[in-house]
Every structure is written in structure tokens, then in C-alpha cells.
Amino acid sequence: MNSVRTGDAFAVYGLLRAGESGFAQFGLEEAFAPLGPCTLRGQLYDLGAYPGLVEGQGQVIGEIFEVRDPSVMPRVDAFEDYWPEDPARSRYERRKVRLIEPDRDAWVYVWVLGVEGARLIESGDWFKR
């Protein structure tokens, strides 16, 4: 099942983090309840105006939230170029992954296209790029 439900954990690492443009644009301060910092497995790439998380070795810094209002998700999916009904059109995929810290499952957007020519963000933190 690929639907986000009330009470699910959602991890973000880029423009959906508190203080970033996507967070404000979608009113996530109302739809998501902050749970604190988190660490995800993978590598973070600078794709220009936004980052992309790629599964693999490494650690990525983010924030974790509890979903209060899942009705916001179709708009957030569209912002992230995730089209569940048309995966070939998607640039990201929303997946449930196991976080490193805290040790729990959370939804996250994972970059599904190539990263050739993109710069690896060594710190794993979009804020410290």
C-alpha cells in the first residue's frame, strides 16, 4: 500500500524541511507535527535548486514529522514530481524506509533518475551544501 495515513512518520531532507520554500508553500506546519531531527541511509546530491536522496551507503540529515492531515499529500507528491499513477513520469518515488535515527519507518522521497554530473553533498545536509 502506498498511501500516507494520519499518524504515519514522514522524513524530509530538502525543500520540505521547516524554513524551506516547500514547507511554507504547502502549509506543512499545519499538516505535519514536528518530531525532531532524523538520519536517513543514502547519499544526497545537489540537483540545482533542490536535492535528491539516492539509496546506498552514507547518511543524510533530515527532519521527521507525524502526518496530521494526509489530504495534503497529492499536492506534495506533485511538487516532488512523484506521480503514483504514472511512475515513468516520476523523478522521485515516495517510499517507506527504515531510518537510522530514530530507529523507525518513515515515508521519504527517493530520487529515481540518474545523478551523472550532480555534486554529492558530502555532509549529507542540504542546509550545509
Image: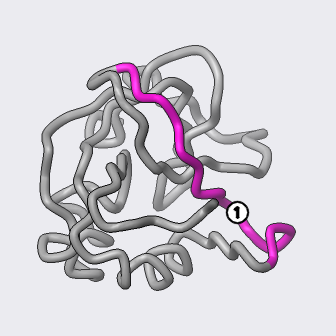
Tell me which amino acid carries mark 1.
Arg
Q: Secondary structure at mark 1?
A: loop
Which residue is outermost to the right?
88
* Rendered view: 18 above or below 87: above
Magenta highlight on residue 87:
yes
- The one of 114 and 119 positioned closer to us in this rendering: 114
Residue at 26% over, 44% down: 64
Q: Position of residue 128 (x, y in %)?
A: 28, 34
Residue at 23% over, 52% down: 65
Q: Position of residue 10 (x, y in %)?
A: 35, 52
* Rendered view: 31 above or below 106: below
Q: Quadrant of residue 69?
A: bottom left
Magenta highlight on residue 24:
no
- Coloured how? one colour
Residue at 55% over, 80% down: 78
- The one of 86 and 70 positioned closer to us in this rendering: 70
Q: Position of residue 95 (x, y in %)?
A: 59, 49
Q: How many marks?
A: 1
Image position of 41 (left or right of 39): right
Image position of 95 (left or right of 31): right
- The one of 80 and 10 positioned closer to us in this rendering: 10
Specify start and end residues of the magenta stretch as a single range.
Answer: 86-100
Q: Where is mark 1, residue-wise?
A: 91
- The one of 47 and 17 positioned closer to us in this rendering: 17
Q: Residues within 10 Å of mark 1 (few under 14, many from 20)?
A: some
Quarter holding the C terminus is top left
Quarter holding the N terminus is bottom right
Q: Position of residue 35 (x, y in %)?
A: 14, 44
Residue at 53% over, 53% down: 109
Which residue is outermost to the top?
57
